[in-house]
Amino acid sequence: MKALTKISIYLILIFVAIAMIFPMAWMIILSLKEYPESLGGFFNIIFSDYTIKNYSEALVSDSFDIYFSNSLIVAFFVTLGNIIFCLMAGYALARRNTKFNTLIWLSILGVIIIPHHVVMIPLYRLIVEFGWINTYYALIVPWLVTPFGIFLIRQYIITLPRDIEDAARIDGAGEWYILFRVVAPLCKPILTVLAIYTFLGNWNSFLMPFLLTNEIDYRTLPVGLTFYLGKQSIDWGHLMAGAGMSALPIIILFIFFQKKIINGLTAGALKE
């Protein structure tokens, strides 16, 4: 029975792995085919000739380099802002006992519960009033700090011992020094998790960049890829090539930082 149970578990895991890997593999296969929509069935696509023509054409056509650089700029600055501001807010909520702390904490939890689509129209009107349509401000400023980031860091800092901070205060260190030289190094695991998830979330963001930009110079990569979708047909080859290149930074991040992600989440769970 134990052997049968193990075999069943492995079969389930293999099935789940195949289900998760297949979309990525299929995207790569289609990106290596010239006009895959004209090839017909599954086996015709698999056994037809392969080419990298779609990648070379996608790189030099339809301002792909602008879309890619815009996504990189937006994701970088939003990630940097979240690391700094969420750390500051999380530290204040974890270590400062004021009469407004409970109210602020409850408001942050309430914002996490609210769906993003609810604030979409008010946010759009606010951006219009500021005159930020077709600017980097619209793509970066509203997301420089997130309630989930504050929640994550606040919960992590609570688990840290106060002794090191108290020792630094006795030595004459100020609050800013304690925050960035004492607390921040201890928060590296959770800051790494926040940075990666924030970068990935903004790299893949489509709806708000689509609403807040209508010029090529400010479109991000997910928005730019939609222009391969025609009214009568879809350019699958170039679309999959662009999607493959847009997924490359995500794959690289996961390969290099998967241990830190797991360690950060596990460390927080164990301390809880």
Image (spheres, helix red, strand yellow):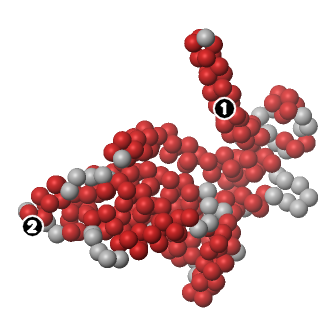
- Residue 126 vs 177, above or below: the answer is below
**Image-quadrant location for residue 179:** bottom left
Q: Which residue is mark 2?
A: 172
- Which residue is at the far bottom? 129
Kindly identify the residue that appears in the image at 77 percent across and 62 percent down: 227
Where does the image place residue 138, in percent across and percent down from the top left? 57, 76
Density class for disc 2 (Cα within 10 Å; few <14, some 14-19, many ≥20) is few
Q: Secondary structure at mark 2?
A: loop
Where does the image place residue 194, in percent across and percent down from the top left? 44, 55
**Image-quadrant location for residue 9:** top right
Kindly identify the residue that appears in the image at 66 percent across and 69 percent down: 117
The residues tagged by marks 1 and 2 sit, at their Cα atoms, a distance apart of 55 Å
Residue nearer the viewer, 237 or 174: 174
Q: Is residue 102 visible?
A: yes
- Residue 254 vs 125, above or below: the answer is above
Residue nearer the viewer, 19 or 37: 19
Check disc 1 and give the amino acid type: Val
- Residue 211 vs 171, above or below: the answer is below
Check disc 2 and give the amino acid type: Gly
Sequence order check: which comes first, mark 1 or mark 2?
Answer: 1
Kindly identify the residue that appears in the image at 91 percent across and 42 percent down: 38
- Residue 93 vs 165, above or below: the answer is below
Q: Which residue is mark 1?
A: 16
**Image-quadrant location for residue 23:** top right
Where does the image place residue 191, in percent across and percent down from the top left? 38, 54
Left or right? Give the position of 58 relative to 197. right
Q: In the rendered structure, are the residues bearing label 1 and label 2 in contact, judged by CB atoms less than 8 Å apart?
A: no
Residue nearer the viewer, 19 or 267: 267
Where does the image place residue 195, in percent across and percent down from the top left? 44, 55
Q: Is residue 81 visible?
A: no
Kindly identify the residue that appears in the image at 38 percent across and 71 percent down: 102
